[in-house]
Amino acid sequence: MDMEGPSAHSTASLRLAGRRDSGGDIEAYPSRDTKHFRVCRFIMETGVKLCMRSVPVATACVLYHRFFERVGIHAYEPYLVAMSCVYLAGKVEEQHIRTRDIINVSHRYFNSGSAPLECDKEFWDLRDSVVQCELLILRQLNFQVSFEHPHKYLLHYLLSVKSLVNRHAWSRTPVAETSWALLRDCYHGAMCIHHRPQHIAIAMLYLALNSYGVELPAGEREWWQHVFHPVFLLHPNRSQQMAAPP
């Protein structure tokens, strides 16, 4: 299969100079994990500026992680792949984002305060690179770009746990907000593609409850047994052969 695409050595078309890290300096990329963390942060910040919903942003991150699970980190320009993942995720989740908007937001991300790119050769070269990279991602993933995310499970679990807690105690602690923030953060790394969405959702809720010391009523079963079938936690291999919980 022809897998030619925009390589890390042909990034002249990107022209996204002045890459920044949290301190504003040129990125040194001390490790593979740090690189992926920073690129996924770019995806999330870009998604916010493009008014993308949380699920399309999550899909973009999963596309990115799955792509680099199959190819070397140095074979392709990570930020170009990220831009294409945002573009493709918009299509998959039916929130189409124009390539021009993605390019301009990305340009401002790397060049704070700069004016939008003119529709010159540089712009069209970058647009072509984004489109070509999108096709490369599709081929690498065998066109399997629809994913099940933990979001719907976390919403269900939050509603179930809320019914078990005194409403005054629930209103005093931001368990829901913290759970959603933890879920968003887990997409910075590859955890989102290595674990089932049910497992991730219950883990985020469990961590949020423990962080604020929220105690749930004691009974014959643990609280998570009321909202989540234990076989999925105790036997992850068997869970792949079973239907997802309601």
Image (tube, helix red, strand yellow):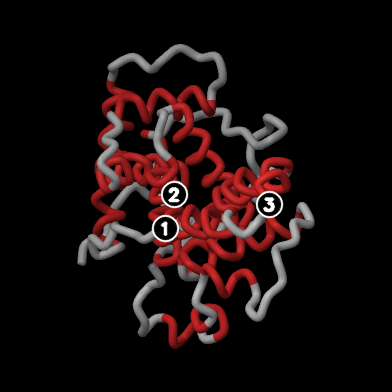
Q: Residues within 10 Å of mark 3 (few under 14, many from 20)?
A: few
Quarter of the view holding residue 87: top left
Q: Residue at x 62, y 33 (%)?
A: 20
Which three-letter amino acid code belongs to the residue tagged 3? Asn
Q: Residues within 10 Å of mark 1 (few under 14, many from 20)?
A: some
In the depicted view, which residue is nearer to us: 228 or 101?
A: 228
Image location (x, y in percent) of residue 152: 42, 55
Residue holding disc 1 = 149
Answer above or below: position of 221 versus 176.
Answer: below
Is 36 on the left or on the right of 219, as rendered? left
- The mark nearer the N terminus, 2 or 3, is 2
Is residue 229 visible to us here? yes
Mark toward the viewer: 2 or 1 = 1
Q: Residue at x 52, y 46 (%)?
A: 40
Q: Which mark is residue 166?
A: 3
Contact (Cβ within 8 Å) of mark 2 with mark 1? yes
- The mark nearer the N terminus, 2 or 1, is 2
Residue holding disc 2 = 58
Contact (Cβ within 8 Å) of mark 2 with mark 3? no
- The mark nearer the N terminus, 3 or 1, is 1
Answer above or below: position of 130 versus 105.
Answer: below
Which three-letter amino acid code belongs to the residue tagged 1? His
Q: Residues within 10 Å of mark 2 (few under 14, many from 20)?
A: many
Image location (x, y in percent) of residue 21: 65, 37
